[in-house]
Amino acid sequence: MIESSCHCGAVKLEIDTAPETVKDCNCSICRRYGVLWAYYSPNQIRISGGPTDIYMWNDREIEFHRCRHCGCVTHWAPVDKSLRRMGVNARLMAPQVLARARVRRLDGADTEKYLDE
Ligand SMILES: [Zn+2]
């Protein structure tokens, strides 16, 4: 299990396993957030503390959560809670944890294909 938190520590995440890969996406929101996403099923993650503020856009199917105090983007979650996939910001993990993950560069802005293949 690994633990991560936002900068001020108000939002804490417990994650069952360290990520093997993380996604660096160039879509309009990911490139601005500067995040690296690690994907999990919600039952692999426990989020405590907060509160978080939520940003949604476009078809409003995904909630982007950020710490209300320090502003760090912590995770995204589907509005439809029956969907069993969510993403956490691997930038919040310890550097030595993130260093072991393979970074995949996704062209989410255009082709939805990986740029590093
Ligand atoms: Zn914070």
Image (cartoon, grey):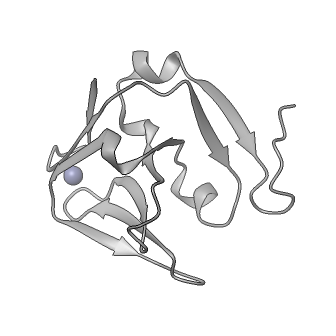
The number of discs equals 0
- Residue 65 percent coordinates (x, y): 35, 63
Q: Measuring from the top left, give residue 15's x and y in whole percent.
A: 31, 34
26 in relation to 13, above or below: below
Q: Is residue 92 above or below residue 32?
A: above
Residue at 83% over, 49% down: 113
Residue at position x 53%, y 81% in the image? 57
Residue 109 located left or right of residue 41: right
Q: Tell me which residue sits at (34%, 73%) in the image.
A: 54
Q: Is residue 43 visible?
A: yes
Q: Point out residue 45 in the picture as x, y percentages from the top left corner.
A: 30, 42
50 and 78: which one is in front?
Answer: 78
Quadrant of the drawing holding the C terminus: top right
Query: In the image shown, does 9 or 2 lie closer to the viewer?
Result: 2
Q: In the picture provided, is 59 more to the left or to the right than 50? A: right
In the rendered image, the vertical position of residue 73 relative to residue 52, given as above or below: above
Decide which of 77, 106 is in the foreground and name it.
Answer: 77
Q: Where is residue 44 shown, x and y percent of the image? A: 33, 39
- Left or right: 91 as drawn, with respect to 51: right
Q: Which part of the image, by quadrant, shows the N terminus?
A: top left
The residue located at (42%, 46%) in the rendering is 41
Is 68 left, or right, of 37 in this rendering? Answer: left
Q: Quadrant of residue 108?
A: bottom right
Q: Residue furthest front?
A: 82
Q: Is residue 6 visible?
A: no
